[in-house]
Image: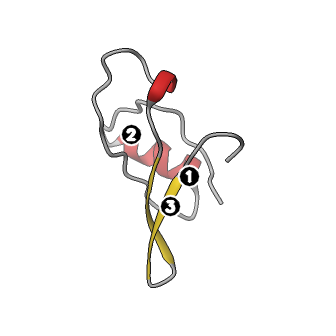
Amino acid sequence: MGTMEYTVFRLDGRSIAGMFPMGDRMPVGTPPHWAAYIAVADCDATVDTATRLGASVIAPAMDLP
């Protein structure tokens, strides 16, 4: 992931979590936190469905390998 330090935690060879130092990448006052990643077949369609059902988007959807 470029020059950013990123640690991937694996269980039985499968990636299950990742961690990076927050440093200057996050706004001042942002507390340590976890973010959930969910595998879906079509990211854009899933976001469309979720928002139609009342969800709020706090970060743009992105495809990850």
CB contact under 8 Å: marks 1 and 2: no
Q: Which residue is drawn at 46% across and 27% down?
A: 23
In depth, the one of 5 and 56 nearer the eye is 5
Q: Say few, some or many: other residues with alpha carbon within 10 Å of mark 1 (under 14 / 14 to 19 / 20 or more).
A: some
Residue extending furthest toward the top? 28
Q: Nearer the viewer, residue 42 or 16?
A: 16
Amino acid bearing label 2: Arg
Label 1: element kind:
helix
- Could you say whether the residue bearing mark 3 is in a helix, strand or loop? strand
Residue 62, compared with residue 26, is above or below; it is below
Q: State the residue lying farthest toward the bottom.
A: 12
For image coordinates 42% across by 17% down, the residue present is: 27
Dot 3 crowding, Cα within 10 Å, few <14, some 14–19, many 20+: few
Tell me if residue 41 comes above or below residue 44 in the rendering: below
Q: Using the image, tell me which numbered label, if any, was put on residue 8.
A: 3
Residue wearing tag 1: 43
User: Which quadrant is home to the C terminus?
Assistant: bottom right
Of the two numbered discs 1 and 2 in the rendering, the one whose residue sits closer to the viewer = 1
Q: Where is residue 28 in the image (x, y as percent from the top left)?
A: 37, 14
Mark found first going from the N terminus, 1 or 3: 3
Find disc 2 in the rendering and name its residue: 52
Where is residue 18 shown, x and y percent of the image?
A: 46, 55
Percent of width and height locating residue 44: 57, 47
Check disc 1 and give the amino acid type: Cys
**Relative to residue 34, is residue 12 depicted above or below?**
below
**Earlier sequence position, callout 1 versus callout 2:** 1
Color theme of the render: secondary structure
